[in-house]
Image: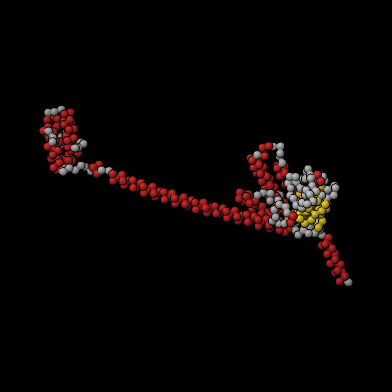
Amino acid sequence: MKSRHLVYIILFFSNQFICAQYEISGQLSNYNELWHDKIYMAYIEPGENHNIASSRQIINSTTLDTYGNFVFKGNNLPPGNSFVRIYLVESEEIDVMLSRKPKNHILLILNDKSKIHIESSDFSSNPLDYIITGDFEKQNNKIKELELSLYNINNQDSNPYLKSEKGKKLIAKKRKHIIKEFCKSNTYPLVNIFAVQKLNIEKDYTNDSDFYKELLYKLKKSNKETFAYVEAFSKKIDVIGYKTNKAEHKADKYNFSLFKDIAIILLFLFVIILIIYIFNLKKKIASISPTHIQPKKYEFTDYNQLIKSLTRREKEILELIIQDYQNKEIAIQLHLEVSTIKSHLSKMYTKLNVKNRNELKTILAS
């Protein structure tokens, strides 16, 4: 009896396990204006880029009826919360194509037991105008909210300025701002992981590493259902951070090395200039005649010859100069005008090769 009860219990839980499956249903009205009736479901693994589609990701497919109704059922999702993308294609031969304009896909968060329903009134002309209900409704509507915001700024065709290079940069800057502000206010971890992948993380991390560190800190506080995606994102940020720090360290090292090389070159040039300056200074000093810094020296015999060349009156004046007579005193002694004495002195200076009275006295003293 007990064994029979045990069998019933095992069968009950086995049945529950077998029956546990996801179900994604919907109606994409007017899909056939652009798309084929084949619809695919792709599972995006942790760490994969949400902006790239591959046939390897496809885990389910079905066919839409004339009214756009479809249903996906299965139990081939891993445990925990997952990202899946449902998308349409242009023809039966194409099994993967991620189109953004026109948009052919919807991204969803779900798990292996989720029941989700999507209603779109016109999927060809207005693919983002859909209503989503069921499990993870708030998270999936947050994804739709962000995609609508980005779609609106990317499709302002009426403004020709936005098509210029300056306009494109303005749009890119605005996109970045919208995504970051969205991540700061949003509390759903997987929605933030989806949102941040719309940024060029490798390039943006260098300029705003604090944003990514704060986001990662917030993500790591989430529950175990999102662990795989958070862990993959964390590893990606760690690798980018390591590369960025390594590049910055290399740049700092290069700048220091460059600064050191410039300093050595400048020091070398300074030494060369100093040597040239000292050499020129020595040359200039050597070129100065000793006669400029020392009194003239004459041989005694030359002096006698110069004295003999003087006139009688000049010799009289010379004798009085030796006795320290001034010009006025010499003029009184010789009964001459002072101007006459000066005239005689000028001639004497020329004959004796001196410039003034002091130099004449120096020669006479020698």
Residue extending farthest to the right is 1
* Relative to 158, 324 lies left or right: left
Residue 129: quarter of image = top right
Query: Which residue is depicted at the point 15% across and 41% down?
Result: 302
Residue extending farthest to the left is 312
Query: Which residue is depicted at the point 19% across and 39% down?
Result: 359
Residue situated in front as seen by the camera: 232 or 88: 88
Residue situated in front as seen by the camera: 285 or 60: 60
Q: Is residue 121 above or below residue 11?
A: above
- Rendered location of residue 47, percent (x, y): 69, 56
* Relative to 267, 219 lies left or right: right
Coloured how? secondary structure
- Rendered location of residue 277, percent (x, y): 36, 46
Q: Is residue 142 visible?
A: no
Q: In this view, does 170 lie above or below 47?
A: above
* Relative to 51, 134 lies left or right: right
Query: Which residue is depicted at the point 63% across and 51% down?
Result: 202
Query: Which residue is depicted at the point 70% across and 42% down?
Result: 154
- Quadrant for the C terminus in the image: top left
Q: Is residue 12 visible?
A: yes
* Relative to 303, 36 lies left or right: right
- Quadrant for the N terminus in the image: bottom right
Residue situated in front as seen by the camera: 140 or 223: 140
- Rendered location of residue 36, percent (x, y): 80, 48
